[in-house]
Image: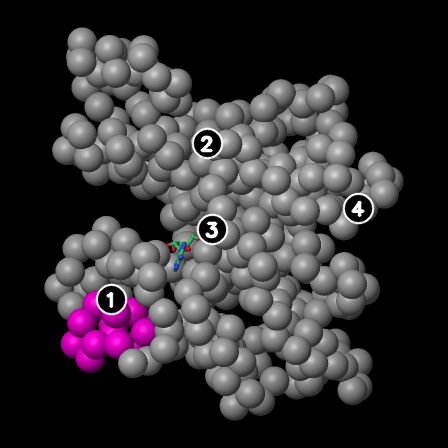
Amino acid sequence: MAKGLDVGTMNILSARQEGTDTVFVQQRNSFVEIEYSDMAEQMLSQSDVLHIRKDDKVYVVGDDALDFANIFNKETRRPMQHGILSSDEKSAIPMMKLIIEQVIGEPQHPGERLYYSSPADPIDSDLSTLYHQKTLESLLNDMGYDAEPINEGMAVIYSELADNSFTGLGISFGAGMTNVCLAYYAVPVMKFSVARGGDWIDTEAAQATGTPVDKVTSIKEDDFELDFRTDVGGVEGALSIYYENLLDYVIEHIVNEVDEEDIEEGLDVPVVVTGGTASPDGFEDLFRDHLESAEIPFSVSDVIHAKEPMYSVARGGLVAARSDEEEPIGDSEPKTEPAEASEDD
Ligand SMILES: Nc1ncnc2c1ncn2[C@@H]1O[C@H](COP(=O)(O)OP(=O)(O)OP(=O)(O)O)[C@@H](O)[C@H]1O
Ligand SMILES: [Mg+2]
């Protein structure tokens, strides 16, 4: 057996194979600190809410953090920022350990192969991914796994471009980052990230319109479409502007980063766009339009929108882990565990 793990700024997901099904388990990468009280004790003991108690504080982690934050009028906190462990959050590691244990469970046997996603170093900030990557590796190895990092963009290619000999450009538009990888027969020839994603869109749109960030995030995640018929001056109008700006920013960096010497003459490859930020209707068309007007040094045969943008990276990790174990890779339908992962159909 083998597993894939997507460690994201907003979501942590695992993927494993059960017969012909791929099973995903998902938790939000957030937590809330509440004072220990009889009421809190009662609520927690009656439910299977993920939590840890430390002295007179209780930490509720994962999906339930948001509900508890609302009940206790607290803010949720996030262990990661811009794709890596947050240096501002001292409790980051124990909180993520708890979430990761819940989504991956015990290894099926000691040394079970597990590939976890790790971003490429961002080219627009001096953040380094090394500490993040090594910390996760030792945390996962301590749990009994044989853990190996996989570049997030490469995971997208493993997940979505098997039919194209793992050749193409994979882009994961996440919360804290956007990860880009160009691979040629499963060999990455260029990879980078930018420290901008959905969080950046939310913060900018909130600032521009004087709206609380949480409100902007929920408007964006709820029925927002990139159709450019939306309200000028309103939140949706601002979201569209920053979406467009993020796409141009990413495409501009692709143009700069692809070294023509690394590219075979006449290279013609598909581009896959995925990640939570790629969810709104109209994203794929907008990306295609903007890519067409850019001067990238290879030709694009197709722009593909991943069917399940939230699951690509975890699935890619699973594909990599299974191919290490030399299990046959089946073309399988995803199956979601009740109350553990959610999927829009
Ligand atoms: N339906 C939706 N419409 C628009 N945005 C969405 C939607 N669903 C989720 N998002 C956004 O997608 C982002 C989360 O995506 P994803 O889970 O791919 O990121 P992540 O892997 O946690 O982050 P990263 O890869 O940057 O570390 C958030 O910014 C969230 O607001
Ligand atoms: Mg991600």
Query: Real-space Cα distance between discs 2 and 3?
Result: 13 Å
Does label 4 or label 2 sit earlier along the sequence?
Answer: 4
- Cα distance between the residues tagged 1 and 2: 32 Å
In this view, the residue in front, 226 or 120, is: 226
Instruction: Looking at the picture, tell me which residue is in the foreground, 267 or 284.
Output: 284
Assess mark 3: CB under 8 A from ligand 1? yes
Q: Who is closer to the viewer here, 315 or 36?
A: 315
Q: Which region is colored magenta?
A: 230-242
Residue neighbourhood size for the residue with mark 3, other residues' Cα within 10 Å, grouped as few (<14), some (14–19), many (≥20)? few
**Considering the numbered disc 1 on the image, is that residue within a helix, a strand or a loop?**
helix
- Tag 3 or tag 2, which sits nearer the N-term? 2
Read off the residue under disc 3.
Answer: 344
Label 3: which secondary element: loop
Where residue 330 is drawn, which disc sits there?
A: 4
The disc label shown at residue 205, or none = 1
Label 2: which residue? Answer: 339
Residue 107 image-quadrant placement: top right
- Ligand 1, by image quadrant, is bottom left
Q: Three-letter amino acid code at disc 2?
A: Ala
Q: Nearer the viewer, mark 3 or mark 4?
A: 3
